[in-house]
Image (cartoon, rainbow, N blue to C red):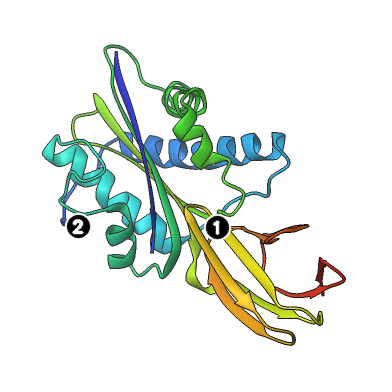
Amino acid sequence: MRCSLAFLLLSQFAPTVMSESPSSSMTAKVEQSIIDDTNAFRKEHELPALEPNKELTKAATEFAKFMAKEDKYGHHADGRTPAKRAKAAGYQYCVVRENIAYRTNTGDVTVKSLTEVFVDGWIDSPPHRENMLADYITQTGVAVATADDTTYYAVVLFGRPESASIQLTITNESDQEQTLILESQASKDEVSMPPRGVVTATRCFPATLTLKNVDAELTVSESAEVVIADGKFIQK
């Protein structure tokens, strides 16, 4: 048995024809089992379940079939990024993350064995585990494909749609100028705000707000209106 895993995060298809085989119904069951096990894992960590999304599922299916047919593996195996594949499938994204894996079997294949090798492998790998437990991810698309009933390729896309971007409005209601620091994932912005000044921002990841030289901090994971008053943040 040979198994490999890979993951990728992106923020901001080659068509194939696969013949129907007895494995088709099994891979469909594996796909659902991966979704179920992923959501069970998230529940253990007090995170909401991910909703299947048809565009993400389309992108995952096309890529899994491509890798199976061409015997190529990797996030850029078809010359595109996961985000570009998702966009080509019609997904308007804010965030796209991807886990992939393949397994070459030397014995009998079952829904349980395939699901376990994929899901357990991702859970045991810190970067894949991080994707599965991302608190800002809301949707998923899962696909499993094989061209020879021996090697199986799995693709899991995790997404947050553009429509769910985090919209922030911050108002300085104090009588003094404040320096707002806004950090989100790898980005950091520093803005001077005069009294009654207003800052608006759009983010795809949860954001942490702090004030320079003031002991005030607020983390927001959903759209919100925030005011600065009395040296602290107040979320409306």
Q: Amino acid at mark 1?
A: Ser
Q: Quadrant of residue 36?
A: top right
Left or right for 18, reference 170: left
Q: Relative to 233, is 32 above or below? A: above
Q: Position of residue 142 (x, y in %)?
A: 42, 46
Which label is found at residue 184?
A: 1
Left or right for 142, reference 74: right
Q: How many marks?
A: 2
Which label is found at residue 13?
A: 2
Residue at x 70% of width, y 39% of height: 43
Q: Amino acid at mark 2?
A: Phe
Q: Position of residue 20 (x, y in %)?
A: 24, 44
Instruction: Between residue 200 and residue 148, name the one nearer to us.
Output: 200
Residue at x 23% of width, y 38% of height: 74
In the image, farthest residue toward the right: 230
Visible in this render: residue 164? no
Which label is found at residue 32?
A: none
Q: Position of residue 107 (x, y in %)?
A: 31, 12
Label 2 SS: loop
In the image, farthest residue toward the bottom: 196
Residue at x 44% of width, y 21% of height: 113
- First of labels 2, 1 by sequence position: 2
Q: Relative to 190, is 26 above or below? A: above
Left or right for 97, reference 45: left
Mark 2 and mark 1: span between their CA atoms?
31 Å
Q: Relative to 112, is 37 above or below? A: below
Name the quarter where the N terminus is drawn: top left
Name the quarter where the C terminus is drawn: bottom right
Instruction: Between residue 212 and residue 233, name the one nearer to us.
Output: 212
